Image (cartoon, grey):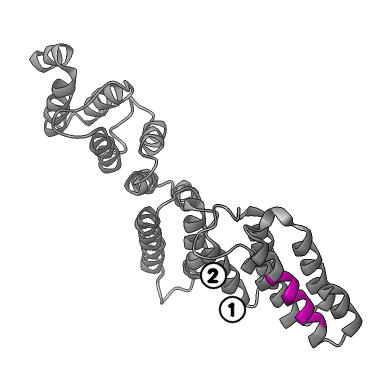
Amino acid sequence: RILRRFCKLDPDEGVEELFGFLESSEKYDEAAEVLAEALENPEFKGKKKTRQQLWNDLANLSVQHPKEIVSIDVNAFIRGGIRAAKEESGDLWVSLAEYYTRSGIFERARDVYEEALKSVTTVRDFAIIFDSYSNFEEAMITSKLGSIDPNQPDEEKNMDLEILVCRLERLTERRPYMLSSVILRQNPHNVHEWHKRARLYIKNEDTVGAVNAYTQAVRTVDPWKAANGKSHTLWLAFANFYENHRDLTSTRKVYEKAVVSFDKYRSSEDLAAVWCEYAEFELRHGDYQKTESLLR
């Protein structure tokens, strides 16, 4: 009672004291309710901890005692913390996934991890979430292995195990692509990263993925905001990709589109470079008349 009165007199300090007392008294539901109510108030500021640290405290309490906390919507409150954090939200995403894991709702936990990887904008958050997601899938495999009796073959359990192993392998394969997406969410005008993303698809012989990457790149990058390279090099790489695949018709279409996309060049020199490459392409493939017309 004394602490609750103190909360009314000095909410910023009183809430922290009351939360700590209720948690130590194993009154987890009350503790969560007190802290959640305080964090709903945008003017609330802790005396000893930042709002971000208090969001993490609420999340950790929910993860450790998912069955005891019934008075608040844990999903909604942790997501509120994620929105408030914007950057450095990785720990909260992991807490939300672990909340569902400890509650035995594994598919929901997996959905949270997937959503998180598609939402975060920093490499730090990505690393935190990806490592936790990998550990989750490894734990699922270990648990399934422990349930299989080698002396009593179970076709259904073996199939479930195979699916889990495939999920982990697929997650590992997707890592570089997801990391690339994070970097491009940070700055969609990062020319170097667009080149790197396209090369990932090319390396894995994914023609459709490479074409989509180049197409998105030339549409997205603003030459005046371009970082780590010049935007016209994306057009040249796109055309070169088709030429290397001996698709001369598509190569010409890229060059034809490139030379009339005047808003995609920061300087006349960049546009001239594309014209020159276009002419050299036609020269390499023996169309001298076309080459001459391009150079006029």
Residue 228 versus residue 296: which sits nearer the camera?
A: 296
Q: Quadrant of the N terminus?
A: top left
Instruction: Give the residue displayed 32% in from the left and 23% down from the top.
Output: 42
Q: Residues within 10 Å of mark 2 (few under 14, many from 20)?
A: some
Q: In which quarter of the image is the C terminus?
A: bottom right
Q: Where are the magenta residues, as a range?
A: 273-282
Q: In this view, does 277 lie to the left or right of 99?
A: right
Q: Seen from this angle, which residue lies furthest right?
A: 289
| Distance between mark 1 and mark 2 Cα atoms | 10 Å
Q: Nearer the viewer, mark 1 or mark 2?
A: 2
Q: In the rendering, which numbered label is found on residue 203?
A: 1
Residue 188 versus residue 174: which sits nearer the camera?
A: 188
Is residue 206 in the magenta section?
no
Residue 235 versus residue 241: which sits nearer the camera?
A: 235
The answer to which quarter of the image holds residue 51 is top left
**Image coordinates for residue 53, horizontal then vertical, percent:** 23, 38
The answer to which quarter of the image holds residue 81 is top left
Q: Report the predominant secondary structure element of the magenta stretch.
A: helix
Instruction: Give the residue displayed 37% in from the left and 31% down from the top.
Output: 77
Mark 1 element type: helix
Instruction: Give the residue displayed 60% in from the left and 53% down from the top.
Output: 222
Under mark 2, the amino acid is: Lys
Q: Seen from this angle, which residue lies furthest left?
A: 2
**Image coordinates for residue 290, horizontal then vertical, percent:** 88, 78
Q: In the rendering, which numbered label is found on residue 196?
A: 2
